[in-house]
Amino acid sequence: MKIAILGTRGIPANYGGFETFAEEVSVRLVQAGHQVTVYGRKAAYPAKKRQQFFKGVRTVYLPAIRKRELETLSHTFLSFWHMVFRNRPHAVVLCNIANGYIIPLLRLCRTKVLVNVDGMEWQRRKWSRLGRAFYRMCVNLTVLFARHDLVADSRAIAGFYKDKFRCDPLYISYGAPVISAADFPQAECVLQPLGVEPKGYILQVTRMVPENNTLCLVEAFRKSKTEKKLLLVGGDAYDTEYIRAIRNAAAADDRIRLPGPIYDKRVVNTLLANAFAYFHGNEVGGTNPALLQALGAGAVVLAVDTIYNREVVTDLGFYFSANAAAVAEQLERILDLDKPARKQLGERARQRIARDYNWDDVARSYAQAIQQRVERL
């Protein structure tokens, strides 16, 4: 089959969950014999880093309007027209419910579509009132034109659509590798430049936006007496007031490290495998790939208490409500854990990821779902 993936910043993944999904699934679909094109944004990939193919996946980079409210929409619109005149796939995997406005055009072109709805995007605090209203409109459009072609990466998200819209999304999770510190014998080469030691730091890898609670973690950590470091990997595509507040708070404590975004998978996996604990503050959305990666690395997880995070973490971690006092309390509990308890949690976490969150299974499920739609009259 010829398949196109629209609605991400592109591959190789260098931003967030959708990009990780696009890379992991597209490469496996190509390995299974399909032709896959992933559309990406020029601004996310400087000209010298663009490549026509990535591990057999065709990549197309197009411009977008560099404004938070318009970037995704404008890029997907251009991707659609490029696809119509230059590509003509049998099916499209459309990422992000905000791109639901394009589904009627896909239907007119008789192109099969599968929509990864992600999470409750309209609940993100970064959006204006108008932006949230637009997202809710896109949800209604998506359900109207693709109610039988929705995919949810979380059972809780699937349940929301079933209760709210009387439709039944297909559940296909995300995936993650299973790793341990033993897989990275040269870890000091990664850790030393960042000023941390094995099991000597608490890690967060995330986009630093308000609903991911990085500032909340920083404020709680500054109140602790631990000698461990706090390593915050990530940033945002825009220089926001929230990012500046994190930098200012971190500058007042020499235990806090802000290396910025890191996209090298081996480096990120090394950091995960050697972390004392992992902080997951994402309030909005379904299953988060970074959370799965942390569990696959056997990290002790401290997660914000949401139905989506409990679905993934179950009894394998600790939970907090989104305020600094609650984070500080749970942080102390984790710091007091002895080595056998941490090891037991880590082994159970790895077993869960290997059993329930495997990228090979995810890709096969998408291939099967696409095939069914291509063959459907």
Image: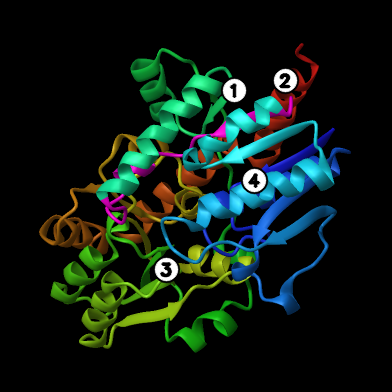
Near-viewer residue (113 or 353): 113
Image disc number at residue 236: 3
For the residue carrying disc 3, how many other residues have a C-alpha within 10 Å: few (<14), some (14-19), or many (20+)? some
Amino acid carrying mark 1 in the image: Asp
Q: Earlier in the sequence, mark 2 or mark 4?
A: 4
Q: Earlier in the sequence, mark 4 or mark 3?
A: 4
Task: Please tell me whether mark 1 sits on a helix, a strand or a loop.
Answer: loop
Between 288 and 107, the residue placed more toward the observer is 107
Is disc 1 surrounded by few (<14), some (14 to 19) or many (20+) residues within 10 Å? Answer: many
Which residue is label 1 attached to?
Answer: 149
Disc 2 to disc 4: CB gap under 8 Å:
no
Residue position for label 2: 373
**What percent of the width, then of the height, locates residue 5?**
68, 44
Q: How far is mark 2 from mark 4, CA to CA? A: 17 Å
- Element carrying mark 2: helix
Looking at the picture, which amino acid does disc 2 mark? Arg
> Earlier along the polypeptide chain: callout 1 or callout 3?
1
Question: Could you tell me which residue is drawn at 38 percent across and 80 percent down?
Answer: 258
- Residue at 30% across / 43% down in the picture? 123
Check disc 4 and report the residue beneath it.
6
Can you tell which quarter of the image residue 242 is in? Answer: bottom left
Look at label 3 and name its amino acid: Asp
Placement of the N terminus among the 4 image quadrants: top right
| Circle nearer the N terminus (3, 2) | 3
Mark 4 falls on what kind of element? strand
Mark 1–mark 4 CB contact (< 8 Å)? no
Mark 1 or 4 closer to N-term?
4
